[in-house]
């Protein structure tokens, strides 16, 4: 029978490498997050500078294998890292994990060109990433997204509106979930890498929230209409059926 102790996430269960990652996060949280968290909220400011400093500490490649330049942390260690950071500032931890989810996603699903192009600047914190699935009319029902993408030469053109994009008011790179074939339902959904500075991409103002303004959460409109974006991957279940 499981007891609550089986689920406790303590550092004794980590190996030496993962324990060192958690210690780095703990030191970082005390030195670079705790002293500023109240000011970030007061100023309603997403602390991109702190995210970049976290990259210097290696904290932007938690899910990326070491041979690709990341830390290759275990899931339990990542949970502990986020616990340390969120204890000082939940918005910062959320923002960092969104960036990490994208570096991990590119490492796992990107092609060699995408790994070479996106991982180095994202692991160094030079470019910040965001995840863009939600739309004004599609939240829990993610399969209902309507942002459309169609082929244009060897790239893709995208048109639609995205909402609630954490890191959105700062991110240079977006992983946008798009519908490539509405008649195929969820099977038509793919992930496209979007340069947030590309012509046609309109960055909307950050949302006023009750708190956690450090998330820099906003929306995007007419994602890159007329611009050519790179396909990252199809949803895994349909990948084998796609070009
Ligand atoms: C601070 C913040 C940051 C966010 N960051 C991101 C981000 O980085 N990227 C991104 O893509 N999205 C992001 N989101 C969006 C978030 O993922 C959505 O808010 C979430 O998916 C819910 O969608 P919704 O708000 O449209 O609510 P809805 O889908 O409209 O749901 C409203 C309520 O109805 C319930 N409900 C919905 N469908 C059903 C059903 N079939 N049966 C029973 N109950 C149901 C839900 O549980 C919920 O309580 C963020 C949101 C917030 C608030």
Image (cartoon, helix red, strand yellow):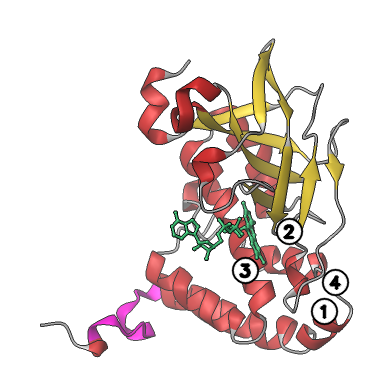
- Callouts 3 and 1 close, C-beta under 8 Å: no
Q: Which residue is mark 1?
A: 40
Separation of disc 3 and disc 2 at Cα? Answer: 9 Å
Hey, which quadrant is residue 29 in on the image?
bottom right
Tell me if 108 is positioned left or right of 100 in this view: left
Residue at 66% x, 27% y is 148
Sequence order check: which comes first, mark 4 or mark 1? 1
Decide which of 164, 155 is in the foreground and name it.
164
Where does the magenta region start and end? 6-16
Q: Quadrant of ligand 1?
A: bottom right
Q: Secondary structure at mark 3?
A: helix
Residue at 85% x, 72% y is 45
Separation of disc 3 and disc 1 at Cα? Answer: 14 Å
Separation of disc 4 and disc 1 at Cα? Answer: 5 Å
Residue 67 x/y as whole percent? 48, 47
Residue 192 x/y as whole percent? 62, 33
Query: In the image, which disc is placed on residue 167?
Result: 2
Q: Is residue 40 magenta?
A: no
The image shows residue 55, relative to residue 147, as above or below, that is below
Decide which of 237, 184 is in the foreground and name it.
184
Query: In the image, which disc is placed on residue 94?
Result: 3
Question: Is ligand 1 closer than 8 angstroms to the Cβ of mark 3?
Answer: yes
- Callouts 4 and 1 close, C-beta under 8 Å: yes
Sequence order check: which comes first, mark 4 or mark 2? 4
Question: Is ligand 1 closer than 8 angstroms to the Cβ of mark 4?
Answer: no
Separation of disc 4 and disc 3 at Cα? Answer: 14 Å
Residue 199 x/y as whole percent? 88, 30
Question: Is ligand 1 closer than 8 angstroms to the Cβ of mark 2?
Answer: yes
């Amino acid at each position: 029978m499981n007891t609550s102790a089986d689920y406790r996430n303590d550092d004794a269960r980590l190996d030496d490498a993962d324990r060192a990652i958690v210690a780095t996060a703990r030191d970082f949280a005390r030195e670079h997050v705790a002293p500023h968290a109240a000011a970030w909220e007061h100023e309603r400011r997403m602390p991109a500078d702190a995210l970049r400093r976290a990259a210097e500490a290696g904290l932007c490649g938690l899910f990326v294998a070491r041979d690709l330049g990341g830390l290759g942390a275990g899931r339990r260690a990542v949970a502990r890292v986020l616990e340390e950071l969120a204890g000082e500032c939940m918005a910062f931890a959320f923002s960092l994990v969104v960036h990490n989810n994208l570096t991990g996603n590119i490492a796992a699903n990107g092609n060699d060109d995408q790994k070479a192009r996106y991982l180095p600047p994202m692991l160094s914190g030079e470019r910040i990433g965001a995840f863009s699935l939600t739309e004004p009319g599609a939240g829990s029902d993610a399969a209902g997204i309507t942002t459309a993408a169609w082929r244009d030469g060897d790239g893709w053109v995208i048109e639609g509106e995205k909402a609630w994009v954490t890191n959105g008011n700062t991110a240079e790179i977006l992983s946008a979930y798009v519908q490539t074939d509405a008649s195929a339902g969820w099977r038509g959904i793919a992930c496209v890498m979007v340069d947030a500075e590309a012509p046609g991409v309109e960055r909307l103002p950050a949302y006023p929230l009750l708190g956690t303004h450090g998330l820099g959460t906003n929306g995007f409109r007419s994602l890159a209409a007329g611009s050519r974006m790179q396909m990252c991957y199809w949803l895994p279940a349909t990948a084998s059926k796609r070009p």
